[in-house]
Image (spheres, grey):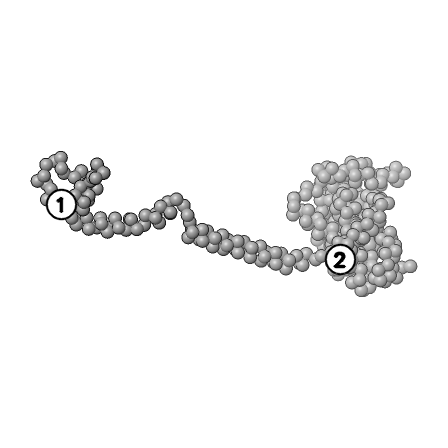
Amino acid sequence: MRYTKFHKNLSAFLDNELSSEDRKQTEQHLSECADCRQELEKLRRTISLIKRVERPEVPSYLWEGTRERLTLPYKTGFRVPRWSFIPVGAVAFTFLMYILISQSFFIKQTSFIKQENIQTPIAIYLQEHKSVYSEQASLLDSYSGLTSTKVNGSSDKSESNTPTSELDIFMEAHYGGIQTDGS
Amino acid sequence: MNDTDLVRLCQNGDMTAFEQLFRRHQDRIYNIAYRMMNNREDALDMTQEIFIRAYQKIKDFNFRSAFSTWLYRLALNLCTDELRKQKSKKKIEISADDLGLTTDVMSVIQVDENTPEDNVISKEQEKQVWDAINSLKDKDRAIIILRDMEGLSYEEISDVLKCSLGRVKSRLHEARQKLKDILETNTELLIGGEGH
């Protein structure tokens, strides 16, 4: 019964929105079908209950509030469309990226320059003693060839005269020993 | 002056004409917003928004339908959009109790002591009806508001909802049927129907 043509027409029947032919057929059916009559009555009561809900009263200040909003520039058609923020945002983003990239590049450059011109005490010391170290390095190179023979050769000497350190060996080989008395 | 004349004046920037249109249609628009949004504050906001949009778009109105039809369509679209936004933020429990709307909504429901006994319903019954209406889907509620609360003809509804008369007929019947089922299941309001 529920999904018959007649059942579907019950709302329109109540609203008097059926064609004369459909109305006639529905009336004929209702006279024969108790279920549909009951369904029709339930629908009628449902509609009646809906209509019982009273209309809310419109506040008197509604127009004043609306007019006030209408006079605001952003509410009267002059509002900046949202899409227009996209190019503005893109420009801002590009500018920001440019600043960030150029900043990081500048930092790198200056740190490199700083590294080159670094004037720490150690650097000054190394620079000043650069020549000394290179001399010593060449001396040590030549010394390394001598020490093996000299050490072997001095093996016959008394223990008191045996060089105790590489420096002693070096001084002895080149200068005849360390002069501790200043002469 | 009819709506068409006022709309023409509005299209030329006449705010006084727009005020006349506003005052002429505010009752229906506010009622639609009130029933759709289910609370007074949102209804007030939406009513203002609907008229502001109407004012902004009135130059596009091409007189192919009645101004009222165009305005109701705008109202329903804006309310539906707003409800969708609200529902996406949080799932609304559409219960008058939970929303604290009972007092607000019930305060405007009329109880006419002088009506025949068949028509008298208690506050509790009115609340049941209101809860049932609000538990319908937006589209079902909309068509019931247009027909049973605002009294629009099927033809006007078909203009507002942009669908055929046949579709209006079936949609309205479905919505009423759902409401009837809810009332039948949850209340005793429909008992003893036949014979009244």
In the rendered image of this protein, does residue B20 appear above or below residue A172? below
Estimate the x, y position of residue B95 in percent, counting from the top left: 71, 40
Q: Quadrant of the C terminus of chain B?
A: top right
In the image, what residue type sits under mark 2?
Phe
Residue at horizontal 68%, vertical 49%? B85
C-alpha span from label 1 to label 2: 101 Å
In the rendered image of this protein, does residue B103 appear above or below residue B73? above
Residue at horizontal 86%, vertical 59%? B14
Pinpoint the chain carrying mark 2: A
In the rendered image of this protein, does residue B191 appear above or below residue A132? above
Estimate the x, y position of residue A117 in percent, counting from the top left: 42, 51
Estimate the x, y position of residue B78 in percent, counting from the top left: 74, 53
Residue A142 in sight: yes
Residue at horizontal 41%, vertical 48%? A119
Dot 1 corresponds to which residue? Answer: A150
In the foreground, A54 or B172: A54
Q: Residue furthest left?
A: A156
Pinpoint the chain carrying mark 1: A
In the image, what residue type sits under mark 1?
Lys
Estimate the x, y position of residue B59 in percent, counting from the top left: 80, 62
Mark sitting earlier along the chain (1/2): 2
Q: Quadrant of the N terminus of chain B?
A: bottom right
